[in-house]
Image: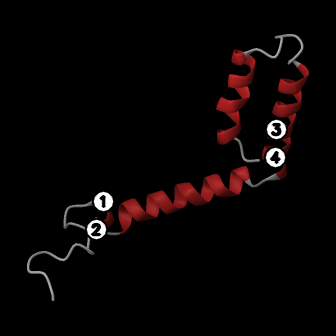
Amino acid sequence: MARAGKDKSKPAENSVHDSGSGFRRMFSDAANFIARAVGRPWAFSLAALTVVVWAATGPVFGYSDTWQLVINTERPSSPS
C-alpha cells in the first residue's frame, strides 16, 4: 500500500544536494585533492615519522595519559 504525501527518497528542493553542480563540483574537487595529497609517499612518511618520534618520547613523559592522548588525537587525522 503506497503512502500519500511527499516522496522521502528525494532531497528537498532547497537542499545542498539539489543546488546544481556548484556545491557538488566544489566538494568533489576538494575531496579528490585531499585524497591525492594524503595518498602520496611523503604523507605516509610524515605520519610514520610522527609515530616514531612519539614512541621515542614515551620514556621522557613516563608513558603518561597525556602522552597517549597525543597519538590518539593525531592518528585518526593522519593518512596511515
Question: Badges 4 and 3: C-beta atoms under 8 Å apart?
Answer: yes
Residue at 27% across / 75% down in the picture? 9
Residue 19 vs residue 78, the one in the foreground: 78
Q: Is residue 39 above or below residue 1?
A: above
As drawn, the label of residue 28 is: none
* CA distance separating discs 2 and 1: 5 Å
* CA distance separating discs 4 and 3: 5 Å
Q: Is residue 24 above or below residue 2?
A: above
Give the SS element for disc 1: helix
Amino acid carrying label 2: it is Asp
In terms of image quadrants, where is residue 73? Answer: top right
Among numbered discs 4 and 2, the one appearing first in the sequence: 2
As drawn, which residue projects farthest toward the bottom?
A: 1
Where residue 26 appears, as percent x and y from the top left, is 45, 58
Residue at 26% across / 74% down in the picture? 10
Report the residue marked by disc 1: 16
Report the residue marked by disc 2: 18
Give the SS element for disc 3: helix
Report the residue marked by disc 4: 44
Give the SS element for disc 2: helix
Amino acid carrying label 3: it is Leu
Instruction: Please tell me how crowded label 2 is: few (under 14), some (14-19), or many (20+) other residues with Cα within 10 Å.
Output: some
Where residue 51 appears, as percent x and y from the top left, is 83, 33
* CA distance separating discs 4 and 2: 36 Å
Give the SS element for disc 4: helix
Amino acid carrying label 1: it is Val
Amino acid carrying label 4: it is Phe
